[in-house]
Amino acid sequence: MGLYSACGKATLNTRIVGGQEAPAGSWPWQVSLHTSAHFCGGSLINNLWVLTAAHCVPNVNPTTITVYLGRQSQKGTNPNEVSLKVVQIIVHPDYNSGTSNNDIALMKLSSAVTFTSYISPICLAGSDSTFYSGVSSWVTGWGNIGSDVPLPNPQNLMVVEVPVVGNRRCKCSKYGASTITDNMICAGLLKGGKDSCQGDSGGPMVSKQNGRWIQSGVVSFGNGCALPDYPGVYTRVSKYEKWINTQITTNQPGFVTYTSSGSDSDLSVSCTDVPPIPTPTPTVYCGRAPLGSHILDGSSVATAGEWLSMASLQKKGQHVCGGTLVSMHYVLSNADCFSGSPNVSEWTVVLGRLKQNGSNRFEMSLNVSNITMSNLTGSNIALLQLSTQPTLNNYIQPICLGNDRNFMAGSTCWGTGWSSGRGGEEAVLQEFRTLVQTCDNVSSTEKICTEQFTLEQGLHPSKGLSTWVGSVHGHKNREGP
């Protein structure tokens, strides 16, 4: 964690007013870079290193730079000030002066600085930080107070509060999508009026979390200052944790994860060059039951999420038969559940149900668009086509189908259903454990035979030991495709 215990503390910071002078000591990590005069800002990140923008020091001889720490005024007196020389400048190796991508640099001071109430390091945003649209941020510096309007004497340090502008919205601004990269973070008012400006470059943009200030950005570029639909653009500090720690190997800066609250409104932003985020197609993992925990011998009560392909087929709102979700569009059941030409409008399929007479917080009821019975001789399979796709979760998933697998005699399998008179007052889903047996007097290519167990009303109607199509589950099929 490095300097975590020391960073981001500003004991003299008692008030914040956007666009106003900053009281002395309010931003103790702020530094001023000078050659003959102030030309850029920066931030103290430990007792020996300063963070700034690459465009401030691309080809500068480090010995020509003086760093002022604890400075309040560029023209007045600064009783709490310390000045140090620079001995090394490290510009990010992938800095592109044409695009301003990776606009970040490190400067090593000539000697270690002693921390005071007016000089102390800032915490840096860790690599897993999230800065949603609207996150309150503060930018400090001695730059112009407007386009080509210099800071008036005595040129005291200024601060402005600006909200983060999400990268999708920033790409949809007048900058255009190609200008803003993932290594940048934008902030400002889209209507204009608040912004960093020339002379602020290299300085910090910070946000407060749990009593600690965290640097999210380095002042990088903008079109003018505070112009409408041109928010300020900053180097996104969280992208550079690994690079910074590679350069600074001892007494490393304090990296802190900034976590935004609520939801990110930027995800819903789209424009010509920023297409909407597509709704992800759900991944179907057939036969897996993340919450499935146990199977008991004999007859037992099932638990929520154990048989997540199980369906309750309901006619006019009443449970008639069980079924099995076999894909995103179909439920498999027994043709004997339907007589004549069934009216699809009378039927619904309920998924994620455990109790027929109790509450089921994870269930989903779906309409049926078509019911098809198999025309194969001796087959009693029915397929119900769903009118809409279910939302898959830990309680609703399709089962795997056999795929010509051979279920040998002796294999363990289970049947599930809402057996009449079982499951207590709430009629909880029942599970039955049995074994595959060799079929007698029927073709084993079309049937699976099991040891006998009691089939009650409400289960799939049957005429033998092998007719629980879709609700007899082979052990091998629970492991997924």
Image: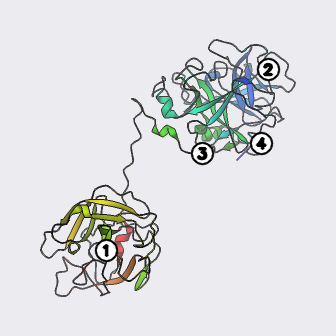
Secondary element at tag 2:
loop
Q: Are marks 3 and 4 in contact (CB under 8 Å)?
A: no
User: Given the image, on which type of amino acid does mark 2 rest?
Assistant: Ser
Q: Are marks 2 and 1 in contact (CB under 8 Å)?
A: no
Work out which quarter of the rendered image holds the C terminus and state it: bottom left
Secondary element at tag 1:
loop
Res 440 quadrant in image: bottom left
Q: Residue at x 71, y 15 (%)?
A: 151
Mark 3 or 4, nearer chain start: 4
Q: Residue at x 33, y 75 (%)?
A: 474
Q: Write down the residue under mark 1.
A: 471
Res 149 quadrant in image: top right
User: Given the image, on which type of amino acid does mark 4 rest?
Assistant: Ala
Secondary element at tag 3:
loop
Q: Is residue 9 left or right of residue 92?
A: right
User: Given the image, on which type of amino acid does mark 3 rest?
Assistant: Ser
| Snapshot colouring | rainbow
Mark 1 or 4, nearer chain start: 4
Q: Write down the residue under mark 4.
A: 6
Q: Nearer the viewer, mark 4 or mark 2?
A: 2
Q: Write down the residue under mark 3.
A: 261
Mark 3 or 1, nearer chain start: 3
